[in-house]
C-alpha cells in the first residue's frame, strides 16, 4: 500500500444554532489544536484522519482544517475569507426547524460562488430529537439530489454519524486526485 499525505480545508455552513460548533467539537477530540482567529470571526480546528482506498492501493493521511463561523451574521467580506480555498463543506440544518432546511440551498450557492463547486454533504443534525422533526427524510433527499450530494442524519449529542459524515467528505475530496494518478 502506497501512503500519501494531503491537507484540505473544510467549512461548516448553516443557520445559527443548527449545531455546527457542536459537530466540530464532537469530531475533533483534540481541542488543543483549536485556534480562535478573532479578526475573521472564525475558529479553526485540525483533525488527522486515515482514509484507505482499497482498489487504488493507496492509504491517505488527511489533515482536515475545519473552519467554524463564530459570528453567524458575518460581514460579506468575512464570509469571502471563510469560503476562500475551501475544498469541501458540510451544510447543516436542524431537524426540529424546517426553515433551516430551506436555507441550505442558499448556503451552498453562496459557497459555490466563492470557492467554485466543491464536494458538499448535507446534514440534518439533532437526530436525537427526531420525534420533534419538522420535515421528512425525502425533503432532505430532494435538496441533496439537486446538488448530487450525499446526506446524513447526525447528532452532535449522541455522536450518531458524526465520524461517518466527516470521513465521507474526506473520501469525496480526495478520491478524484487518487483516481487521476492511477
Ligand atoms: P451553531 O454552531 O450552528 O450555531 P451550536 O450551533 O453548536 O452552538 O449548537 C446550538 C445549540 O444546539 C446548543 O444548545 C447545542 O448544545 C445544541 N445542539 C447541537 N447539536 C445538537 C444535537 O445533535 N442534539 C441536540 N439535542 N442538541 C444539539 P444550547 O442550549 O447550548 O444553545
Ligand atoms: Mg457556532
Image (tube, grey):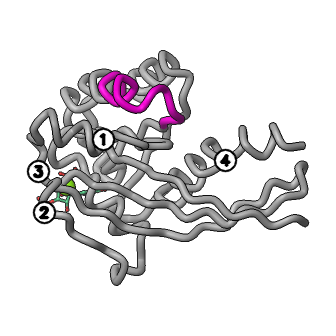
Report the disc number at residue 13.
1
Tags 1 and 3 touching, CB below 8 Å: no
> In this figure, which residue is indicated by the disc labeled 4?
174
Residue 149 vertical placement versus 155 (above, below): above
Q: Is mark 4 within 8 Å of ligand 1?
A: no
Q: What secondary structure do most residues of the magenta stretch adopt?
A: helix
Q: Split into 4 quadrants, where in the image is the N terminus?
A: bottom right
Rendered residue at 53%/35% (across/down): 119
Q: CA distance from mark 1 to mark 3?
A: 12 Å
Q: Earlier in the sequence, mark 2 or mark 3?
A: 2
- In 3D space, how far apart are the residues under numbered discs 4 and 2 (Cα atoms)? 30 Å
**Residue under numbered circle 2:** 38
| Label 4: how many Cα within 10 Å (few below 14, some 14–19, many 20+) | some
Asked if the residues shown at circle 4 and circle 2 are in contact, with their CB atoms under 8 angstroms apart, the answer is no
Q: Is residue 36 above or below residue 12?
A: below
Left or right: residue 52 versus residue 49 is right
Looking at the image, which is closer to me, 49 or 82?
A: 82
Q: Nearer the viewer, residue 107 or 83?
A: 83
Magenta residues (range): 108-120
Amino acid at each position: 500500500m502506497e501512503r500519501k499525505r494531503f491537507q484540505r480545508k473544510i467549512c461548516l455552513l448553516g443557520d445559527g444554532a443548527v449545531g455546527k460548533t457542536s459537530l466540530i467539537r464532537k469530531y475533533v477530540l483534540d481541542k488543543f489544536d483549536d485556534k480562535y482567529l478573532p479578526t475573521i470571526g472564525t475558529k479553526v480546528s485540525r483533525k488527522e484522519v486515515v482514509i484507505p482506498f482499497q482498489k487504488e492501493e493507496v492509504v491517505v493521511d488527511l489533515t482536515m482544517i475545519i473552519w467554524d463561523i463564530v459570528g453567524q451574521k458575518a460581514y460579506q467580506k468575512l464570509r469571502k475569507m471563510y469560503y476562500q480555498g475551501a475544498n469541501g463543506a458540510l451544510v447543516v440544518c436542524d431537524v426540529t426547524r424546517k426553515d433551516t432546511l430551506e436555507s441550505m440551498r442558499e448556503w451552498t450557492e453562496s459557497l459555490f460562488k466563492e470557492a467554485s463547486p466543491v464536494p458538499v454533504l448535507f446534514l440534518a443534525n439533532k437526530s436525537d430529537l427526531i420525534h420533534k422533526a419538522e420535515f421528512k427524510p425525502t425533503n432532505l433527499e430532494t435538496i441533496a439530489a439537486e446538488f448530487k450530494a450525499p446526506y446524513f442524519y447526525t447528532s452532535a449529542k449522541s455522536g450518531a454519524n458524526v465520524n461517518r459524515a466527516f470521513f465521507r467528505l474526506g473520501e469525496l475530496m480526495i478520491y478524484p486526485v487518487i483516481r487521476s494518478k492511477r
